[in-house]
Amino acid sequence: MIFDNHNRPISYLRLAVTDRCNLRCFYCMPEEGIKYLPKHQLLTYEEMERLVRVLAKLGVSKVRLTGGEPFVRNGLMEFLEQLASIDGIQEWNITTNGILTAPHIPELVRLGVGSVNLSIDTLDRERFRLITRRDELPAVRQTLDALLAHQVPVKLNAVVMEGKNIEDIPLLSELTRESPIEVRFIEEMPFNGGGSHYPVLTWTHQRILSELKSLYPDIQKIPDPANSTSYSYQIPGYKGTIGIIAAFTRSFCGSCNRIRLTAQGTLKTCLYDSGVLDVRALLRSGADDADLTAAFLKAFAHRPKNGFEAEQQRSPVTESMSTIGG
Ligand code: SAM
Ligand code: SF4
């Protein structure tokens, strides 16, 4: 196990397999989309597999595939087959918008997916269309039903936004009544491809919690999983749980065990840094595994203490979450 300069273990990789997406969620990218990278600038699956092998030797045991939308990249299922067989990778999961996901669920189960995070900010078709700029809620609901039918552990991700989906806080919470899912309410972050953000975030994790407490006065705090970014709650008698993620307030950095590889192969040791290592350039200049290992170790020894420190060390955020992976 490798520890960073703040004595935090590095054990979890978030790997963005593409920057492409079939939605245009307004908090993630502009309506016209982002300028996608030319294909040759994306990491190939072979490069990703090699990097995961190197990182697994350093103690990374958990990988999350994300993007962009992972299922828009051809060859994803073949890559997952390779990933699942890498020594040291004990758990791999996927975050998806659910539009193309349903037909792949039996194969995901066969390959041993740990859990699927499904992004669904609203249960209302019109609100969904306004938030994502596409009329695709039925496909996402179909994926949710199929995941539950196949007993895949499911987490639902919902970014909480003033004027967009506040009505959905009770609707999404009610899904935990009969289903053993975790609904996670997430603070909105500034990664919308335009750099804009509210002067003050209205729906902070504290406000989300007070809304939940007013809806469910007997909601209970339950233990948070180790290294979790979410504060966990449960409504008594309900089968599922509710999480609140302070993604903008950044109150969880002290136990952060994550690193990220963007779709173009940039290493981020904090979500809020602007990239600390061009791994693709290293790979394509002929670096061997020892060179890669040394470069990773050097980056892990210089991690910012928290997301505020990382943000201070960079130019203002302009990127889309679609290139980072969330
Ligand atoms: N396309 C997939 C999806 O939407 O699930 C995976 C990639 S997406 C970038 C990963 C997660 O980041 C999603 O749950 C999405 O809601 C979240 N996300 C994107 N932009 C965000 C923002 N500005 N603030 C908070 N969460 C954001
Ligand atoms: Fe696409 Fe996910 Fe970004 Fe929405 S949040 S635009 S689904 S990458």
Image (cartoon, grey):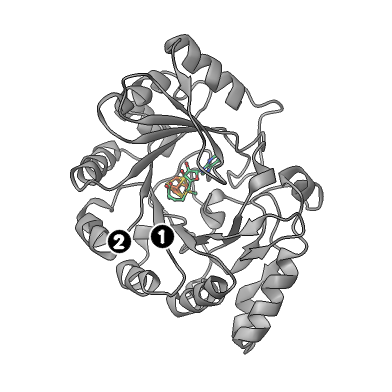
What residue occupies the far right of the structure in this picture?
Answer: 313
Kindly state the secondary structure of the residue where label 1 is placed: strand
Give the mark nearer the N terminus: 1 vs 2: 1
The residue at 81%/47% (across/down) is: 312
Horizontal side of residue 306 vs 106, given as left or right: right
Q: Position of residue 267 (x, y in %)?
A: 64, 65
Number of marks in the rendered image: 2
Q: Find residue 136 and report its image quarter.
A: top left
221 or 131: nearer the eye?
A: 221
The residue at 23%/63% (across/down) is: 110
| Residue topped by disc 1 | 92
Placement of 282 over or under 114, stated as above or below: below
Placement of 172 over or under 262, stated as above or below: above
Labelled disc at residue 112: 2
Q: Amino acid at mark 2?
A: Gly
Q: Amino acid at mark 1?
A: Trp
Quadrant of the frame with the N terminus? bottom right
Kindly tell me whether mark 1's CB lies below 8 Å from ligand 1: no
Q: Position of residue 19 (x, y in %)?
A: 49, 59
Mark 1 touches mark 2? (CB < 8 Å): yes
